[in-house]
Amino acid sequence: MLQVKNLSVSYRGNYALREINFNLEPGQLVGIFGPNGAGKSTMIKAMLDLIPATSGVVTFKGNPLKQKLDKVAYVAQRSQIDWDYPIKVKNVVMMARTIPTGLFRYPSRQSQELVKMALKRVEIWDLRNRQIGELSGGQQQRVFLARTLAQQAEIFFFDEPFVGVDRKTENIIFEIFHELQEQGKIVMVVSHDLGESIKNYTDILLLNQKIITFGHREEVLNQRNLDIAYENHILPEV
């Protein structure tokens, strides 16, 4: 189980997140929704100890999650990635094998095979020797999706993975999310799309500095909860 207890984040006395509490079991595919500035990305980064939390504890199987980061795959927002860095697609994906391989050691045959399988699964094996900056937005996102698959993690975090991608890439991403779910993985996805794609998530976490509600999609998605989360902004019907 992944447990988040009383997680809060503040900057100069102002809370970005306040007392976040929830539990996740293997096989949950969770969409994290809320308005801009709600703290969605902040929550993920605080859970991963990428930014300091004011208070709170995050555990996985009873141990601090920050001590189990080899079990975690994380894809940041595309805007946070340096696409001009000169690196080939296959080497980006091979980065997922750094911990099991060890620094300055040649990747094992198993690692090479996992990278190949991951790139084929996201349908960009033929682009493996291209510089990542030469790819389209959708192809770039698939590279990082392949990296998470090669890592063989147990928990997956994706921050706005659908921004700037094509429909084919979106379909591949959701297919893989469902495959990970069927494998008993925990998948958390930050998104802003309240359209038809929201039906892909089994559970929804509505956030606006604090958790508005969290539960099964059909229980969470009603106009009252959305009005509270989005503070009566105009939203599409669900």
Image (cartoon, rainbow, N blue to C red):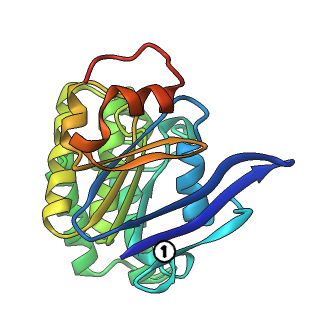
Task: Quadrant for the C terminus, please.
Answer: top left
Based on the displayed image, in which of its 4 quarters is residue 183 positioned?
bottom left
Q: Secondary structure at mark 1?
A: helix
* Residue at 52% from the left image edge and 55% from the top image edge: 44
- The mark tally for this picture is 1
Quadrant containing the N terminus is: bottom left
From this viewpoint, which residue is outermost toward the top?
234
Closer to the camera in the image, 180 or 202: 202
Q: Is residue 224 above or below residue 203?
A: above
- Residue 35 lies, in percent from the top left, at 52, 29
Dividing the picture into quadrants, the one containing residue 36 is top right
53 or 94: nearer the eye?
A: 53
Q: Quadrant of residue 227?
A: top left
Q: Residue at x 51, y 62 (%)?
A: 21
Residue 153 position within the rendered picture, expressed as x and y whole percent measured from the top left: 33, 71
Is residue 85 in sight in this rendering? no
Q: Position of residue 226 (x, y in %)?
A: 41, 29
Judge whether 88 appears above or below 132 on screen: below
The outermost residue toward the bottom is: 62
The percent coordinates of residue 57 (x first, y second) are 60, 73
Foreground: 171 or 121? 171
Residue topped by disc 1: 69
Q: Residue at x 73, y 47 (%)?
A: 15
User: Residue at the location (44% across, 58% down)?
Assistant: 74
The amino acid beneath tag 1 is Leu
**Is 109 rendered above or below residue 12?**
below
The answer to whether residue 22 of the structure is visible from this angle is yes
Mark 1 Cα-neighbour bin, 10 Å: few <14, some 14–19, many ≥20: some
Residue furthest to the right in view is: 12
128 displayed left or right of 75? left
135 or 86, which lies in front?
Answer: 135
